[in-house]
Image: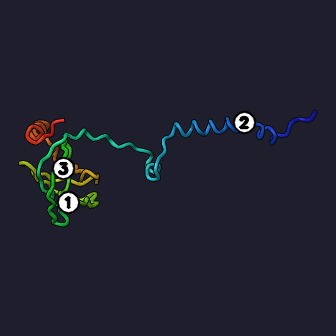
Amino acid sequence: MSEPNRKEDRSARPVAGMQSEIARKMVKEPPQGFLASLFGGRRKKKAPAMRECCIVGVLMVLDRSLALDGLVMGINEGGVIFRQASTFIFDRMGAEVSIRFGEYDRRGRIVEVLPEGYRIQLADRFSTWDILALIQSYGIDA
């Protein structure tokens, strides 16, 4: 009897075994977008939880000298979520802003545009005592 051809050996391998191997690789590696694959899948640091509140405020977009009335809807030590008192939220990502609410006037940068409003990272962090005082005065009971 002659020795089997190597081509026949490869074709004799079960296809289902190959598919399960590929499927196992896909399960281990979560799908990534194009940009995430370029930057090595670095994970974002999780921001501290926002405390819900409702404080009337004014957001000044510094490069356009534009004042936007609205509400501060969430607050933590490093930032706020500001909801513009308008039907539309414009993409102002990266804009330097000044936000006034309560007795505070802080500078920051818009880091995310959400349906709920603008997520603003503040240049000067709030102290825990400031947050507690604001939540006690303007917080929303959960």
- Report how far apart the C-alphas of labels 2 and 1 lie in the structure: 61 Å
As shown in the figure, which amino acid type bears the numbered disc 3? Ala
- State whether residue 27 is above or below residue 40: above
- Report how far apart the C-alphas of labels 3 and 2 lie in the structure: 60 Å
Q: Which residue is mark 2?
A: 14
Residue in the picture at 14% in, 54% down: 99
Callout 3: SS: loop
Q: Which residue is mark 1?
A: 86
Label 3 or label 2, whichever lies nearer to me, is 2
Relative horizontal placement of residue 47, taking residue 9 as reference (left or right): left
- State whether residue 98 is above or below residue 65: above
Residue 91 vs residue 108, the one in the foreground: 91
Residue positioned most to the bottom = 64
As shown in the figure, which amino acid type bears the numbered disc 2? Pro
Counting residues from the N terminus, which is met first, the one under dot 3 or under dot 1? Answer: 1
Quadrant of the snapshot with the N terminus: top right
Callout 2: SS: loop
Residue 110 vs residue 52, the one in the foreground: 52
Counting residues from the N terminus, which is met first, the one under dot 3 or under dot 2? Answer: 2
Residue in the picture at 24% in, 54% down: 110
Q: Which residue is mark 3?
A: 123
